[in-house]
Amino acid sequence: MTGAEGAIPVPAGPATPAKDARPRTGRLPSGWRVVAAKEFADHLHSLRFGILFVVLGLAAVVPLYFVSDTLRSVATQASGTQAIFLALFVAYYSPASGVAIPPVYGFVGIVAPLLGVAFSFDAINAERSDGTLPRLLSQPIHRDDVIVGKFVAGLAVIMLVLVSVVVVISGFGIFRLGIVPEPEAVLRVIAWLGFTIVWVSLWLAFGLLLSVVIRRAATAALAGFGVWVLLQVFGQVLVGLVAGVVAPYATAASAQEQIDLKNLSDAITRIVPLTLYQEGSSVLLNPTVTTVSTPATLGQLAQYAYQHQIPQLLSLDQSLLLVWPHIVALVTLTLACFALAFVRFMRQEVRA
Amino acid sequence: MSPTSRRRPAATGPSSRRARLRARASRISATGDAVAPILTRALTKRYGDLVAVDSLDLEISAGEIFGLLGQNGAGKTTTILMLLGLTEPTSGKARVVGLDPARHPLSVKRRVGYLPDSVGFYGGLTGRENLRYTARLNGLAGHESEARIDEVLGQVGMVDRADTKAETYSRGMLQRLGIADALVKDPEILILDEPTAAIDPIGVVEILDLLRQLADEERITILLSSHLLSQVQSTCDRVGIFAAGRLIGVGTVPELSQRFGEPTARIEVSLDDVDVPGAGERAKTILANVPGVTAVQAPERGRVPWVLLAAPDEASAVRVAVLAAAAREGLQLTGIRPVEPSLDDIYRSALHATGLAGNGRVAA
C-alpha cells in the first residue's frame, strides 16, 4: 500500500475473534520419518525396484553359478580352512578360454551404484516438476525433513536389497554346497555388507545432489548414469593410463625410486572410488589379503616378502584396520555429496 | 472434469462441525482479545534489484475473505510465500495467527492451509492417499484423519473419484483436491493461490460457495489471489489491488469503485420498437432531455440497450425521471438498470490512476 493510503480500512465484522488454535490431538511427528515412510513405500511399489532387484540378483547369482563347481570340488580338501565360506563372495571364474567372471563383490561394486542413483536421481526435481514441492513444504515440517527423509528411504531400500542378496548367496552356500560359516566369516560378511552400504549410499547422495541441481529428472538420470559409466567402466582404465604416464614405476632407475613411483601410482588409481571399494572389499572378505599398499621403503619390502613365506590369515579387526582409510574416504565422500545437496536445497527458492 | 464429480459440495457432517465450533468457542473464551489473523507492516521482498513486494501493509480479520488481485508477476505469490515462512522477507514484519512466520514456521504452517498455484499431487497415489500423507505430516492419524479426509473430500465434491490415481485427474479435479488438501489440517486460515484457475464455470460457483460457507460458518479466514477478477468479485469481502509489488488500493468493491471507478454513473435503458424509421431519433431526443442525463449513447443496431451517463449522485433520480419520461412520451421501455462497475474496470482504472498500466513485468 502506498504511504498516502493511510489507515487500512478493516470492516467491522462480527465480534468473533480469530479462529484460534484449539488443542490439537497428537503432537507433530518428526517430519523426516513421515517423508521417509512414504518414500520407502513408493520405492517398494515402483517398477525400478523390481528391475534393480533382478539386476542385482543376477550380479550375485551369475558368479555364484560359475564358481560353485570349483568350490564343490575344492571344498573337500579345503574343509576346515576359515576362508571357504567367504570364497562364495571372492571366488572368481577365469577359464582358459571364454569370458572371465569377476567375483560377487566385483559385480556388486559395479552394479550396486546404479541402485543408489536410481533411487535418488528424481528425488527433488520430480517434486518440483509435479508441483508437489510447494504443497509439501507448506506442511508443518522443516525443509531438511524432506531431503533427509528421502535419503533415509533410499538407504533403507538399498539395505533391503543388499541384505536379501547376501542372504541368498549365504543360503546357497549353506544348503547347496554345504558350507557352514565360521562366526568370524559371518562377521566379515556383515562388515563387507556395511562397507557396501556406504559405497552405495555414496551414489545415493550423488544422485540426490543431481536431483537438487538439475531441474529435469531425465537429464539428472542421464548425468548420473553418464558419471557411472565414466567412473565405473572407464575410470580405472583412464586413471591407469594417467598413472602410467605420471609414475612409470616399471622403468624406474633404482629400487627405492621404483617403490616411490609405485606408491604415487597407487594413490592416483585411488582417485576412482571403485578402486577404494574393491580394495576394501577384498581385504574385508579375504583374510589372506594382508596388504593394500606398496611398502614405502626397501626395508618394509623385505619384511613383507619375508612374511609372505608363511601364509597367514588376518583377524577381522586387523583387516578393518587395514582398510580404515578406505572406509573413512568413502564415508567422507558420501557426506560431502549429501552436504552439498542439502545446502543447495536449503537455499533454493520454493518456486521453480 | 468428469460429470460425476460435478456435484454440489456435500454438506459437512453436522456433528463434526458442531464439535469444531464448540472447541473453537471454548478456545475463544480462553484467549479473549482478537488478533488479526494476517497482519503485515512494511513487508518488503527484493530479488536483487527487483522489488517483488514493496512495503506491504495488510490487515485481514477473522472470517473474512480477502481477494488479492493482480496480474501475473504483481507479487501475489511472493507475498503468500512470505506469509507461510517459505521465503524470508527482506524487511518489514508479518504476523500470521499472531506469529512471525519466519521464526515459527511450523506453528504457522500447522494452522494455515495453503493451495499453491498450479498444485500437483503424487500421480502414483490415489487422491485419498495423497490427502492421508498430508494428514500424517500434520500429525493426524487413524480414525480421526480418515474421518477428516472423508469430510473434506465431501466438501469439494471429490468423493467418487477419491480412490483413483491422481495421475488420471483433470486439472480441475487436481484443483479441487488441492483445496481438500489445504482443508485436511482443519486450518484457521486458508491461503489459496488462484483457487479457481482451470475449473469450469459451474465448478467455480461451487468452489466459491464452499469458501463463503467456510468463512461464514467456520470462521476461517481466507486469503485468495486471482487474476480472474470478475470471478472472485462476488465472493470477497474486501479486495486488495496489487500491481508491481505494491498494494494500490484496498477495500470493498463499492469502495474501490468510488475511488477508482469512472466519475459518471451508467444506466442501461432497453427500448422496443426503435426499428421504426425516426423512432430512434425521437427516443434519443427524449432521453437526452431527461434532467440529469449528461450524454446518451445510442445502440449501434438491434435491441442492445441504450446507455445514459449521469453524475453518480443523481443516478437514482435519473432512473425515476427516465421512467416518467417514457410513460409520458409513450416510449416502449422494456428494461432499465444501473451498470455496476466490474472489478475489471476498477482494476484497469486503478492501474491507470497510479501510472502502473502497461508495466508488463513478468518476474514475480
Image (cartoon, helix red, strand yellow):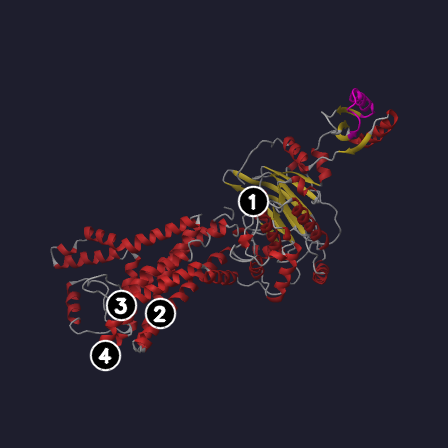
Horizontally, residue A217 falls left or right of residue B180, namely left
* A274, above or below A5, in the image: below
**Where residue A243 sits in the image (x, y, percent)?**
21, 53
> Looking at the picture, do discs 4 and 1 lie on one chain?
no
Which span of residues is magenta-colored? B269-292
Does label 1 lie on the same chain as label 2?
no
Q: Which residue is mark 1?
A: B91
Mark 4, residue position? A76
Disc 3 to disc 4, how far (Cα)?
Answer: 18 Å
Q: Chain of mark 2?
A: A
Q: Nearer the viewer, mark 3 or mark 4?
A: 3
Q: Left or right of B168: which side holds A63?
A: left
Question: The disc labelled 3 sits on which kind of residue?
Answer: Phe
Disc 3 is placed on an element classified as helix
Q: Residues within 10 Å of mark 1 (few under 14, many from 20)?
A: some
Residue at x 82% of width, y 23% of height: B286
Mark nearest the camera among 2 and 1 is 2
Provide residue A116's location: percent of width, then percent of height.
Answer: 39, 59
Q: Secondary structure at mark 1?
A: strand
Residue A2 image point, x, y percent? 64, 37
Q: Which residue is mark 2?
A: A166
Q: Residue at x 21, y 52 (%)?
A: A241
Based on the displayed image, in which of its 4 quarters is residue B31 positioned? bottom right
Tags 2 and 1 touching, CB below 8 Å: no
Callout 4 and callout 2 share a chain: yes
Q: CA distance from mark 1 to mark 3?
A: 69 Å
Which one is nearer the viewer's eye here, A250 or B160?
B160
